[in-house]
Amino acid sequence: DNSLSLSEPLIIEVVTDQLNDLGTISLIAKQLVDVNVNLTDEDSGEGVWADIIFVDPNDQGLEFWPIILPSLESDQSEEGSYTVQIPAGTYLIKAERFDGLYQTAFYDSNNSGEANEIEITQGFTDSIDIALASKPTANVTFQLTDSNTSQAIKYAWFDFLDAEDEFAPIVFPQLDMIDFESDDFNGTYTLKVPGGIYKVAVGAHAYQDVMMTMRAMTWNLWWRFGPWEQRQHAIVETI
């Protein structure tokens, strides 16, 4: 977050081949403002979770993650309703999911298609309401086993990278609940991802990472591949 800052620019000199002692660096704490944010599914109106990010309108490469306050009644809090703290300033506000299941959306109070610049000051009372549009999704199943022992591999991770756009965000997919200590676990992982063509990185502790390219098909894309007999292969195609 941007709740701490230097009082003035700091210039340092780093000398190679020796220990560089930068001394004490003092930061100034900024006064924080409470902001209420509500995130909903565009179709159902139900609350959803997402990262809430405050963006510098003059340089959208500068993004700040606010402090999220725990609910005073966390067992009764409604999903999608958050109170966050951010220093006073002018921001764009966006909601983004790391699993890619919803489209990224900026706060746009009048649905004009343009993100609103919001001036956050002490005593700010406006409610920031953002509706997120869901993406068509597909379930993808992997079974990971040790090539030498055939034992199931536990605690693997998966990164889905856009195969056609190297600058697109990495998708960290939703993973079905797994009991890794169960005797029934056979290395099967079921993930939910948006439809698309991906380069998939698969990794696990003490194992070499594997990279593959695959197509995740969703129902609304099947018709593009013609008759059913032709579509079957496209749906499960691994390139």
Image (cartoon, helix red, strand yellow):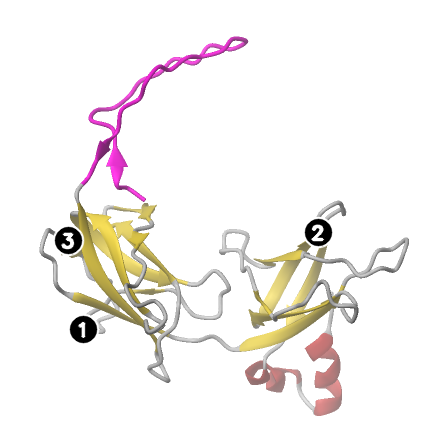
Q: Secondary structure at mark 1?
A: loop
Residue behind mark 3: 120
**Magenta-drawn stretch contains 5:** yes
Q: In terms of image quadrants, where is residue 40?
A: bottom left
Around disc 1, counting alpha carbons within 10 Å, would you say few (fewer than 14), some (14 to 19), or many (20 or more)?
few
Q: What is the quadrant of the N terminus in the image?
A: top left
| Kind of residue at badge 1 | Asn
Between 166 and 46, the residue placed more toward the observer is 46
Q: Which mark is residue 210?
A: none
Residue behind mark 2: 204
Q: Which residue sits at x=18%, y=67%? A: 127
| Kind of residue at badge 2 | Ala
The alpha-carbon separation of the residues under discs 3 and 1 comes to 18 Å
* Left or right, residue 184 beside residue 149: left
The alpha-carbon separation of the residues under discs 2 and 3 comes to 43 Å
Please state the horizontal and vertical placement of residue 59, each as a whole percent of the image. 28, 45
Q: Is residue 57 visible from the viewing direction of this image? A: no
199 over 28 or under it: above or below: below
Depth-wise, is mark 1 or mark 2 nearer the camera?
Answer: 2
Between 177 and 148, the residue placed more toward the observer is 177
Residue behind mark 1: 110
Q: Which residue sits at x=33%, y=48%? A: 63
Depth-wise, is mark 3 or mark 1 nearer the camera?
Answer: 3
Q: Which residue sits at x=48%, y=70%? A: 101
Identify the mark nearer the N-term, 3 or 1: 1
Identify the mark nearer the N-term, 1 or 2: 1
69 over 143 or under it: above or below: above
User: Which residues fall within the magenta stretch?
Assistant: 1-30
Q: Secondary structure at mark 2?
A: loop
Q: Secondary structure at mark 3?
A: strand
Identify the mark nearer the N-term, 2 or 3: 3
**Dominant secondary structure of the magenta stretch?**
loop
